[in-house]
Amino acid sequence: MKTTFKYDYYYDYETIRKNCQYFVSNYPELAKMEVLYTTSKDRDIIALTLTNFNKGNELAKPAIYIDANTHAGEVCGSMVAMHTLDYLLTNYYEDAKIAKMLDEYTFYIIPRISVDGSEVYLKSAYRLRSVDRDYLKENVGIYQEDIDGDNCIRMMRVKNPLGKWKKDPTHELAMIHREPDDVEGEFYDVFIEGMMEGGPLDDLFEQKNRWGLDFNRNYPFGWFGEHRQKGSGPYPLSNPENKAVVDFVLAHPNIGVVLTHHTCGGVLLYPPGTKSEKLADKDDMKMFKEIGAMCTKEMDYPCINVFDNFNDDQEFYPSGAFDDWCYQEQGILAYTMELWDLRKRCGKSINWYDNSEETPSQKLEVFKAMVDYAIKENLDVLKPWTKVSHPQFKEVEIGGIASKFFYQNPPTKFLWQEVENGTRFTLRYALSLPKLTILNHEVIKLGEDTYKVDVEIANKGYLPTYISNEAKKLNKVEPIRVSILNCETFDENIKQIDGLSGYALTDSDYNYYSNINTSGHNMLKTKVSFIIKTKALDVKVLAFAQKAGKAEIVITLPR
């Protein structure tokens, strides 16, 4: 796929900012950039608007919203978002299909939400969830620190006659649990590589990550406090980053679909995440699945429901997530893309339809498979157990896998595959948006300068003009407004249509008796009539739907 920039390394904040500025400077008719929030460390959360501004206002076109790096370490998502905007702009003047997309649709892209946290992740050994702000910090226990100076946080094993672990005799890097009869031998505790704060050195345990805020638990739907949901913050939208995202979505009512990029797992998730899919709207779930099937074709990722197939705990489920706020509070179709599936590459794919927990022996086999894969692909991510002089514990051993660009994100040699496949699905997803059109018209002359004008308004897109039945339930649907200009009317000059279905909801199936069957179109089009008086030669009819864009036609009147 042709792009302006390369996608064989992970961009830091400054690279993202400069690349975005490049596109805005070189494609001013197609791209605009705004700052949603500036952090205390003087980094901007950037949003780009991509559309052909010479062919209509951005808000008058159906829109897809794309973001990435809700979580600091999930930097592969930023690369997909940047690749998507790069591909669209670089190819606009060479590819008629891309040109048509930017002429008729709007793309909103926030390439990195956690601008501070991702810098820490990319430029230090530390790992963190969303941002490097202390949150309910504990002052006792082992905290992460790069003891051996290799710019990576790995495992640290400490000899302890009471330890739960012992060496795996079949695998140099692996550790296995002591069995019930292991009363003699060499035993260990295994911790994150780090230092002990507070507490006695003969009672070691890990402390909670001091940077434990989780942006994807701070959105204002299904929010719970820290007693129930770790990292949720003191109240919904307490993080200014979260508030900036919500304010942006609300300020752009043309957004009909959302794609938020995360890692890892190689799976496309759709809401609800707070209740079973069986309790959600049947038509909405059908649309989620059919759009998700395109992701399976482009990325070989399954498309599954968050609550039923992704959540480990369906009683104390994760909550306050962005996709749930979009769908269950705004009626917008929203997917969470979990990029990069190391386990599949290792031959240990997850069965997302089996909610049973893996046994310790199964987890050990996955670990060994990952090590073997790293060796096979000649990836510089492994460190054998190495004795290190520790400032507090005297002698420890440090070793294991460098997980940042192996497990959590793809190694750079595979990055291009994720970004290209991600862009392919994104573009197909955008084309599922509703699209208002005027199919036909008829004019009947009733008398001198008096006419009856009939226009047939239709939705040629996959999704309904109201996006989802959930939006209807939430009263988040604006009617389609049809107006006629350059004349007087004998009734209203603006007519309203409640909504038009998309072809997603056309009743059709494969049937053994009639083979292939269409049984109904479910309000894909409707006729609107005006009685007008005018001396003009022609009139203009405009149709507008908040999430399906604008359609217009100039009608020459008979004389």
Image (spheres, grey):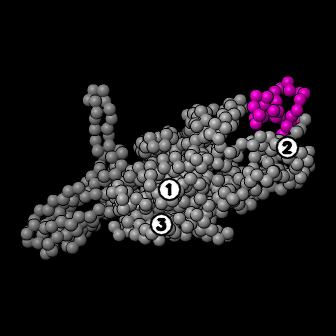
Q: Nearer the viewer, mark 2 or mark 3?
A: 2
SS at mark 3?
A: helix
Asked whether, in this view, residue 127 is left or right of residue 329, the answer is: right
| Spot occupied by residue 7 in the image (x, y as percentages of width and height) | 54, 54
Q: Which mark, residue 83? A: 1
Residue type marked 2: Lys
Residue 237 seen from this side? no
Q: Earlier in the sequence, mark 1 or mark 2?
A: 1
| Spot occupied by residue 425 in the image (x, y as percentages of width and height) | 45, 48
The residue indicated by pointer 3 is: 23
Residue 139, picture quadrant:
bottom right
Callout 1–callout 3 Cβ contact below 8 Å: no
| Spot occupied by residue 381 in the image (x, y as percentages of width and height) | 69, 45
User: Does the magenta portion include 108?
Assistant: no
Residue 373, picture quadrant:
top right
Q: Residues within 10 Å of mark 2 (few under 14, many from 20)?
A: some
SS at mark 2?
A: strand
Q: Nearer the viewer, residue 83 or 208?
A: 83
